[in-house]
Image (spheres, helix red, strand yellow):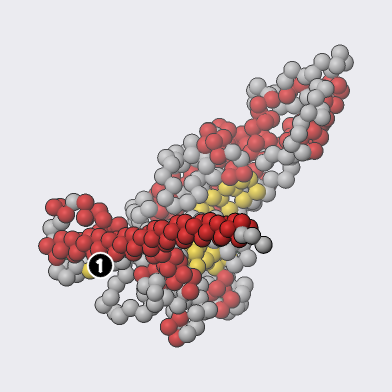
Amino acid sequence: MADVEISGDGSGNSKRRRLLDGAARLHNDDDSPPNCLADLPSGILAHTASFLATPSRVLLLHALNDSDDDVPSSSSAIVGSHHEVLDFGQIEKALAEKLSDQDIQRILLHTDAFNKVKKLLLTNCIKMTGVGLEPLRGSEIIEQIDLSIVEFVGDDRETSISCDHVLPILDSLIEREGPAMKHLQFPKKWRKEVVTESDFHAFLGRYNQMWEGRGRIDCPMCKEQSVLAYDGEEQDIIGPWVYTSEHSEEWNFYGTHNNVCYGCLKYSCGECDDGGSLLHFCYKCERTYCVHCATLNYCSVCEKEYCLDYCKEFYSCDGRPDADFGDYDFKCGQNICEDCVYSEKRECRKCKKSYCSTDCSNRTYDEDEINRCDHCCSFLCYDCDNPLSSSNTLAVADFFNKVLSGRHDIDKLRKCGDCNKAACADCQLKFGKSVENLDCKGCVKMIVSALLEEKEMKKELQGELERKNERLESNSAQIEELKEENCRLKNGIKEVKNAIKGLPM
Ligand SMILES: [Zn+2]
Ligand SMILES: [Zn+2]
Ligand SMILES: [Zn+2]
Ligand SMILES: [Zn+2]
Ligand SMILES: [Zn+2]
Ligand SMILES: [Zn+2]
Ligand SMILES: [Zn+2]
Ligand SMILES: [Zn+2]
């Protein structure tokens, strides 16, 4: 243990080494290092454990002790005592994926979850069936359980969570007078479709009843509206605590909470001015957040909201819709989610800028003119399609540079006169390589003329280049001639000078 100073990656590491070093000396009279972690004194273990998330602390405790009964006096120090939030998303994903019901049961027992845990997030516990949640049965403390296991809708990992095991425990949390339960995030596999005869659907009914049984709850924001409809009153406006039907095929709210923030558990009616803008539903993680707990962006293309960065990346529209009226500085700037930029191909394939609408990318085109390829759907923004009429001086300069250096590729959409379909330069090239596979005669004609035109243009550019070279060559020949002439003249001068020298004075 003499290598205290070797650790080069920051003082934290060497500090920990020193601690372990000290521990070894404390424990072993003969100065030999401890053989395993269990040999370390409990103070050191407790200190080490304080860096870990709660589930890891319990797992560490069990790794140190072979049997459940043999729990040392140091156990509470290792596990700690602040367990209001038990979040399995805080431990390694690979570890959480391996946890069995027995592991989860142990963690709940050791943290005294029944009396302490208010928020339980079972992120990544894909092996858990729900049997392991038994220690929570009847808890009057717990306010929130996230049973969704996977973080996003669309994560198709196989999960073991089962209604048979979980619902009886959840019933015990909502059945008595005055339970604390405010939010349950259900697994997507239970919420995929509404099955009115299912146990899950019946549970949602009981859960809503529990809230209705509390009578009217005023919205804390406006103090006017009820937070939820009870006795069927105002059902259309405010709705129940959790949705028991699909909102629409695309917007599936089934089994999600209506009016409570996933983060802080505050609720609002969702209808008053404050409340209306306060809660936002993310279509990727399918959680509702207040503006204080998460930032959600609205995509102006798909008209959905998503947690910014965490659930989706956003781009802002580069369109300058007022450029034709002389205002080139005004940028549209509307948010577009990553899906809409890529899957809807709203990114110009040449300049890679994103555009929210055809108005923004298409500004001066007539209505029946197009700048999107009907074959691959890629599109070319106005500036790239019309470099010469572009008000973007950089685009114009770039175009001239390319033409002058002979690198100008003809990136122009062409429209077939017969089928009316437009083809981009890439598709034209692709079709040009196998014209025989094209069904439409008009398209064949278009491709052939495009290729000819391109050939013509290349020829022209080539000709221009050759003429330039010829001029250059003739110039250099002229220079050679002049040099020779120069030489001749110089020699003549020399001869004349010599002749002058030879003259009698
Ligand atoms: Zn309100
Ligand atoms: Zn909140
Ligand atoms: Zn989200
Ligand atoms: Zn979108
Ligand atoms: Zn462009
Ligand atoms: Zn725009
Ligand atoms: Zn194309
Ligand atoms: Zn055609």
Q: Nearer the viewer, residue 502 or 94?
A: 502
Residue 333: % across, % down:
51, 72
Q: Which residue is mark 1?
A: 414
The amino acid pointed to by label 1 is: Arg
Residue 94: % across, % down:
54, 36
Kindly indicate the quadrant of the structure image that contains residue 278. Answer: bottom right
Residue 17 vertical position relative to residue 341 in the rendered view, above or below:
above
Question: What residue is rendered at 12% in x and 62% in y?
Answer: 441
Question: What residue is rendered at 19% in x and 64% in y?
Answer: 449
Locate the N terminus and report the quarter of the image it occupies.
Answer: top right
Left-right relation of 370 to 48: left
Kindly indicate the quadrant of the structure image that contains residue 475. Answer: bottom left
Q: Nearer the viewer, residue 40 or 20?
A: 20
Q: Across the whole image, how many numbered discs are drawn on residues?
A: 1
Locate the C terminus and report the quarter of the image it occupies.
Answer: bottom right
Q: Nearer the viewer, residue 400 or 3?
A: 400
Left-right relation of 341 to 414: right
Residue 306 vertical position relative to residue 43 in the rendered view, above or below:
below
